[in-house]
Amino acid sequence: MTAHLNIEVIIFNQVARFCRNLLKNNSDICSTEDLKLNVITRQEHNISRKDLSDNALKVLYRLSNAGYDAYLVGGGVRDILLGQEPKDFDIATNATPEQIKKLFRNCRLIGRRFRLAHILFGRDVIEVATFRGHHKEENEKKNISAQSDEGMLLRDNVYGTVEEDAERRDFTVNAMYYNIADYSIHDYANGIEDLKNGIIRLIGDPETRYREDPVRMLRAVRFAAKLDMTICDKTAAPIAELSPLLRDIPAARLFEESLKLLQTGNGLNTYWMLRDFNLFQQLFPVLTPFLTEEGNSPAEQMIELVLRSTDKRINSGKRVNPAFMFAAMLWYPLTAKAQEIQDDNPKFDHYESIMEASNLILDTQVRSTAIPRRLTATIRDIWQLQLRLPRRTGKRAFVLIEQQKFRAAYDFLEMRGKVEDGETKDLCDWWTEFQDAPAPHRNNMVQNLNGGRRSGGPRKRRSPYRKKKRANNDS
């Protein structure tokens, strides 16, 4: 990471702070009481306005020109310092959501837990947040802020100063503010040093911060995997024990988080970290009985295959469909449930058992991560086609290859062949050959399945005229 950071530390107290951190154990807690402003001037960092999108600059300058503080904050600052391209640009300001809305006609206010402003530029959305403050007793009486009995924040519309906002940030590497007024970076939590040393560290007491928002446990893993960093000891210590708190998070939010974790190009590494911290088990409870210490069960092999494939596609700039990933990951819980149903109800055939099991597995999974209906429909299609792929006689193979979801079903069958071998691999090999074969060879392949009888491929229909003419000649 140091190679990506072209930051020259020339101020004495910066050098001193760096030396102190080298001598400290990386398990130290970053206490909010220890936060001190460290201003890094334009000459001392590598962030340029060229690194920011035009829309982000428009928002920053309009806020600044209207007399408000305007900072680029969080992942945008962190990623540019690392020499990476930011995925999005978040802005923090002392303007309230209502004041922001007055400045931008293309503004939409969202959020109940914490009020945010989204500035819309077509499909590009710049998120603007008002500086968050500390919770005070008088604020709670006004119903501005509220916490559950477990310490989770239910409402958080308490505004404050930039210093207070920095204390409310989750990780030190996300508590750096790029000031559009003078192009300096305001580093409140020594995030520069943690960034250089490759450390993910929570600001404040880890258990308290995780209880406030359990999703921070997922974010710690995501950042560590994405940035190839290490979660410091004190930040990592409570995660496994507190992981069940994720069950209290809305399933829709966990679905979005699951995509950020597994479909951003680092899914396989993220998966193993999630398992180590007992977080994957909270997101995918139906898979928990199939996880082993050796990590080599059919379900685990399939998870590795689909995540490795997903990472490869994303890193090659190709699109991915979340439905395919979920269909592959949940296949072996599905087949196990289907067998259980068939054992309890001998009258059920294999197809009926799979259909019934698909309802039960998806219903259970949706309660944890709310997979949208448009995706569950595709998941069902991929599963159903697995039952149709072995049926290739007559016209079936020719009809099946024209199905819209055939390619996804075939790709999944190919993965199954690597896990199951035997008949499944033979079936996959047959479809691989059939797809690329010319029409005569396809007919021969199906004819061989029919035991030498004529294939069920496309055939010419006899003209009624020819039939009539032949009858007249006979007479």
Image (cartoon, rainbow, N blue to C red):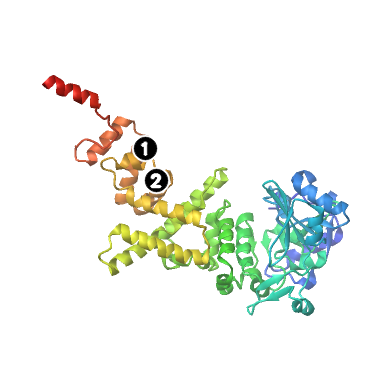
Q: Within 10 angstroms of label 1, few (less than 14), some, or many (20 or more) residues?
A: few
Label annotation for residue 410? 2
Q: Secondary structure at mark 1?
A: helix
Query: Quick one: which residue is furthest to the left in this view?
Result: 475
Report x, y in % for residue 149: 64, 80
Q: Give amino acid for label 1.
A: Gln
Residue that extends furthest to the top in the rendered view of this protein: 473
Image point (62%, 66%), residue name: 215
Q: Residue 302 occupies which quadrant of the picture?
A: bottom left
Q: Please say if the residues under marks 1 and 2 sit with CB atoms less than 8 Å apart.
A: yes
Residue 258 drawn at (x, y percent): 56, 59
Q: CA distance from mark 1 to mark 2?
A: 10 Å
Q: Is residue 147 left or right of residue 183?
A: left
Q: Residue at 22%, 23% (x, y): give it.
A: 466
Describe residue 188's horizontal placement relative to residue 268 as left or right: right
Task: Rate crowding at label 2 as few (under 14), some (14 to 19) or many (20 or more) other CA atoms within 10 Å.
Answer: some
Could you tell me which secondary element the residue under label 2 belongs to? helix
Residue at x-position 40% and y-position 48%: 409
On the question of residue 108 being in view, the answer is yes
Residue underneath mark 1: 435
Taking the image as shown, residue 202 lies to the left or right of residue 409, namely right
